[in-house]
Amino acid sequence: MWHNSFGSKFKIEIWGASHTPEMGVRIGGVPQGIALSVADFESDISRRRASARGTTARHEKDIPTIVSGVADGVTTGEIVEIVFHNGDTRSSDYSQFEQHPRPSHVDFVARAKYGDAVDLRGSGQFSGRMTLLLVAAGVVAKKIVGEVDYRTTIVEIGGSRNEAEFSTIVESALRDGDSVGGVVECCAKGVRVGLGEPFFDSAESIISHLMFSVPAVKGVEFGSGFEGVKLRGSERNDRFVDGEGHTASNNEGGINGGITNGNDLVVRVAIKPTPTISREQMTYNKSLGEVAPLVAKGRHDACIVLRAAVVVESVVAIALAELSLQNQ
């Protein structure tokens, strides 16, 4: 039904869904001779796992199986395919949404577009579960990009930028059967000058295209972003301090004219509150033909931002791999 693929040089295609027995990612454009093993994936996959208070009670092993594209511990130049198994699923939790679609969720539009037979168990291919495949692709992408230092942090939760308040805000949402969103910032240090093209394949375009593919992402900004528009040009301009292109400030987020300028690449991503909540919501029920109370069952994140930092970082790495291979 879907052809979920991205890229012209670093090509990724994801398949499967949240509650299918298996799901995976195929990665094309990977050069020969790159060391790659199952152990390489553990660090980033563990960062995505549900463990903190406020994350889902669904626990998957998330052990990757490298099906193809690697022999004797190095890439062969063929398509790298990585497969994961789904085991801890409770598909019956989602039957209530067939006639009573969740507010701000995909239930209504997915059935309107694809019909009632669409697989929305665990939200199907629309699920945040699918971001595991982006993290796996990001591990491979980082090896292609090379010596880039990714520093990714949660900078806001529930409207607060005080990290000391984050856990209290999440706990309050849990008690209320509610959810909160937030902002993740990724700073990539060591990105070389010259990646990206004007207009349609600009560095911002490629990164944003990928970033908006991540479920729950509602905003992307580079550098000073929306805050920067409050400044005058004389205040916001990044003045050059040497012949290598280093600047006194970094309001542009490391990109000029769609091309990386050698300064830190800084991207900030707004992630909405998880729409599936146990708190009662008055919303339209198709079987009743009227607005009726909905109390969502199931295991859901009260704050998906807690698991999103590595996903944002992986997307930046995938985009940089695509841009790096284009530049060759």
Image: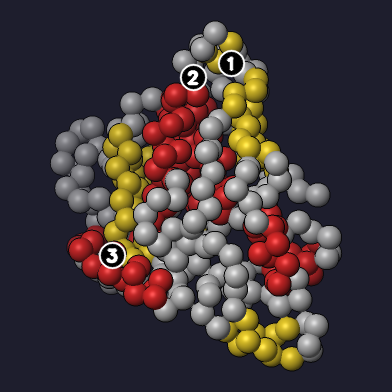
Determine which residue is flagged by label 2.
36
Q: Distance between the residues labelled 2 and 3?
A: 36 Å
Q: Tell me, yes or no, if residue 184 can be seen here.
A: no
| Displayed quadrant of residue 106 | bottom right
Residue depicted at x 79% and y 59%: 118
Lower sequence index among marks 2 and 3: 2
Image check: 45 left or right of 124?
A: left
The label number, if any, that marks residue 166 in the structure image: 3
Residue contact between numbered discs 2 and 1, judged by CB atoms under 8 Å? yes
Determine which residue is flagged by label 1.
70
Residue depicted at x 44% and y 58%: 55
- Relative image position of residue 19 (x, y in whole percent): 68, 50
- Relative image position of residue 293 (x, y in whole percent): 63, 87
The label number, if any, that marks residue 109 in the structure image: none
The amino acid on which the numbered mark 1 sits, given as a three-letter code, is Val
Lower sequence index among marks 1 and 3: 1
Image check: 168 left or right of 57?
A: left
Q: How far apart are marks 1 and 3 (CA)?
A: 41 Å
